[in-house]
Amino acid sequence: MAPILCELEQSNLPFRLILTGQHEETIDQLLVEFGIQTPPIKLHQGKEISGIMQMGGWFIRCLWLCLTQSKTLFSPSIQTTDNVILVHGDTISTLLGAIVGKILGFRIAHIEAGLRSNNLFHPFPEEFTRLAVFRLSSISFCPGQWACNNLNRYRTERIDTGHNTLIDALAIALQEASSMEPIHSSGNYGVVSIHRFENIFNISRLTKIVELIEKAAESYPLIFVLHPSTRKKIVEYNLLERIEKNPQIKVVARMGYIHFVGLMKNASFVISDGGGNQEELSYLGVPTLLMRKATERQEGLNHTATLCCYEESKLILFLSQLSSVRHLFKRPSLSPTKIIINRLAAFASAQQ
């Protein structure tokens, strides 16, 4: 969403930035990294949401705040149907924003709409979230014709942005990262990032993932970037000491986006379960092993991105073919962010 926020500021379009606090630990750093000046309104401040019970309580509190303080949060034009709530992706925060907007009678504009894995449990609960938000949305900004086609049976205005706004965020990050000291001096390393619900809340699956990471470490040194929720489960399952004892695996805390982009860009490969990472790395031309059984994205699939399905044979084959997928980053001539801002500007004009 960073390119959207930057463009809204530059275009002087009125908006409010409401943060749910789902990822509290890194959001302030992200705002600074992208130079976003608008002071955010925070619904939750405290520890990052990393557990199921914690998430349930957080969701109810945020929903209650939005509904009971709607005139403060969404003023001054609470009654107009021209107000739009922008939500993004497939997180629980996405669903929260869509539900709040629907109850208050606003239009819901969904950015990164139309993505499907067509498997309700891979990823879970993200696939359920998407289906719910599809039904609630008035406007769907789809990153490509394939995503648009996935919304054929939904009553929503479909707009093809060609690519995800992530490609604009990546271009900004690459420019900033070029002037930073690299986190790892050698390009002969792999990066690991695991955080999805269906992976970290399943002890047998997470243990299997650790075994596969250890297998990859036999061939390459690895940098394991631990999300707070992942660290919590790895400690709970008594896997952290095992990982840290491996001399080929360096464990680091989750970092800012620009530093992380620089780390991935210079890596020989990345092992991840993130759809965003799959897309970013397809643009960067970095080989990506998806620690999943299904993916909601088409970017890089069977080219830069390989579905691992938690199988060692696919990991070994992937590592043997790393040199065959590299290409240079190329930004599209028509920015998806510009397409979205042009559509949103119509609502601002209607209110004047």
Image (cartoon, grey):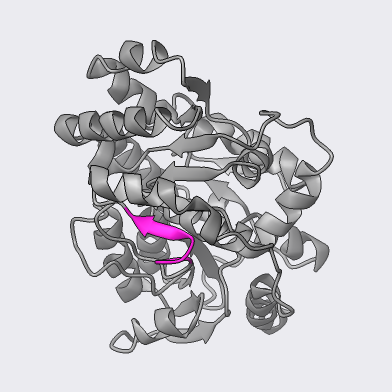
Residue 301 magenta-highlighted: yes
Of 8 and 76, which appears nearest the observer? 8
Horizontally, is 288 left or right of 229 in the view? Answer: right
Q: Can residue 317 be seen in this snapshot?
A: yes
Q: Residue furthest front?
A: 320
Q: Position of residue 195 (x, y in %)?
A: 37, 38
Of 80 and 323, which appears nearest the observer? 323
User: Which image quadrant for residue 177?
Assistant: top right
Horizontally, is 73 left or right of 99 in the view? Answer: right
Q: Which residues are drawn in magenta?
A: 300-307
Q: Residue at x 79, y 45 (%)?
A: 176
Residue 234 magenta-highlighted: no
In the rendered view, would you say 9 is above or below 151? above
The overriding secondary structure of the stretch rendered in magenta is loop
Of 299 and 311, which appears nearest the observer? 311
Q: Residue furthest left?
A: 204
Q: Residue at x 30, y 35 (%)?
A: 212
Q: Residue at x 54, y 70 (%)?
A: 84
Quadrant where the image shows the C terminus: bottom right
In the rendered view, would you say 164 is above or below 95? below
Q: Can residue 291 be seen in this snapshot?
A: no
Q: Position of residue 293 (x, y in %)?
A: 24, 55
In the rendered view, would you say 342 is above or below 121? below
Q: Position of residue 251 (x, y in %)?
A: 48, 21
